[in-house]
Amino acid sequence: MKRIMWKTSLHYCETYQEEELRAALSQAIEDLGGFAPYIDPGDRVLLKVNLLLSKGADSAATTHPAFVRELAKLLIEYGAKVVIGDSPGGLFNEEILRRNYRVNGMIQAAEESGASLNYNTGSRTISLPEGKLLKQLTQTAMLGDVDKVISVSKLKTHSMMTFTGAVKNMFGTVPGTKKAEYHFSMPDSDDFADALIDICLAAKPVLAFMDGIIGMEGNGPSGGTPRRINAVLASDNPFALDAVACHIIGLERPAVFTWQHAWQRGLAPDRFEEVEVTGEPVERFLCPDFRMPDHINPELTSDYGVIVQKLSHTLRPKVRFQKDKCIGCQACLRNCPAHAIRMQGKFPKADYHKCIRCYCCQELCPKTAIRIEESLIMKLVNRL
């Protein structure tokens, strides 16, 4: 097998102010050899951002609009035509997209940069012979409207997959409620990781950028806490980029499902040390106290990865609804792939026999009213 050269650019950036952010992104692009090896002038380029749900930039749940704006400006100056888009969780239609773009600051980012926003909510089915689980998959039709795709992710923890980054960001190329079908048909985190890898390969991102200036720790991808990291990352390989980001927040390969399975398939480095990092030294960004989701112990998963992951299928955490925060909007009910949630009066209630522990309910709750509670046995193990 031909040896893959793992390269990632890493630059320091303290704020989302225009000048500092533009400088960091420009340096990162220069480290990769500029846009020319990946994009031709005149190409229509999709910035596949992480818009997850309608939350403001200060929540750190989505790619910051300033990050998207400055990257779009640089691409347009190069000669590309830029489209900003995503298929967030839940229904995928123009009305919901407009609301999401407005709340997440993407309308302003597009106006200020000269980019356009995707409103094509159609879908298409493609073949993927190289896929491990998905030999055929459904994509958003917006991929057919562009020549090149760039992943523009947010550095965050993830309650189901431990970490979400450049690779998992491409799950947003699956349209709307089709995501729920994939979750339901692949409830096992190992299978779901391979599906995410297949989806990323199908989208074929030519570059990957990550907004790690302010990331999210704790109960991500939407219910966690903003955490300053001051990092701008870029790579021509989303798997290499994720490996560097994971190293920064103290995660090793066995703890991260997508990294572990990509490595098994020869797509990702075994260790962070195999990645050539240009720009700033990674030691400047290390966050050894970065908090994982409440039910995940990164030390256990790093040391005993496979054993703990398999054990966790037996001693799985449960979702708990916090009535003091819940507004009865039923977003959890509408977005549950397993139909394991029903309303009991004003408040939701979960059927744990049906629950597949995908945590879509927590991910898409607008009020962070859902927490994940580990089992008593795992609580005791985590305290050893």
Image: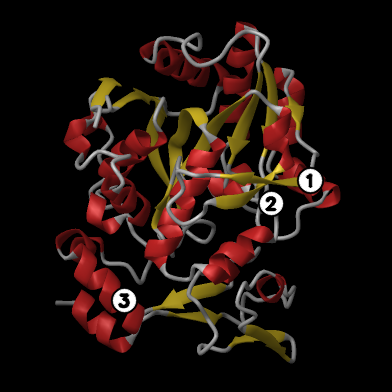
Q: Secondary structure at mark 3?
A: helix
**Pick the front one: 41 or 243:** 41
Above or below, 328 against 29 in this view is below
Q: Which residue is identified by label 2?
A: 175
Please determine whether, in this image, residue 224 is positioned above or below residue 12: below
Residue drawn at 45 percent across, 61 percent down: 192
Measured Cα–Cα span from mark 3 to mark 1: 37 Å
Name the residue beneath numbered marker 1: 121
Kindly indicate the quadrant of the structure image that contains residue 39: top right
Q: Amino acid at mark 1?
A: Thr
Q: Which residue is mark 3?
A: 312
Using a 10 Å C-alpha cutoff, classify the residue at mark 2 as few (fewer than 14 neighbours), some (14 to 19) or many (20 or more).
many
Question: Do we see residue 280 in this rendering?
Answer: no
Residue 104 as seen in the image, left or right of residue 199: right
Q: Could you tell me which residue is drawn at 37 percent across and 69 percent down?
A: 294
Where in the figure is residue 314, as x and y percent of width and height?
33, 83
| Residue 19 in sight here | yes
Q: Nearer the viewer, mark 3 or mark 2?
A: 2
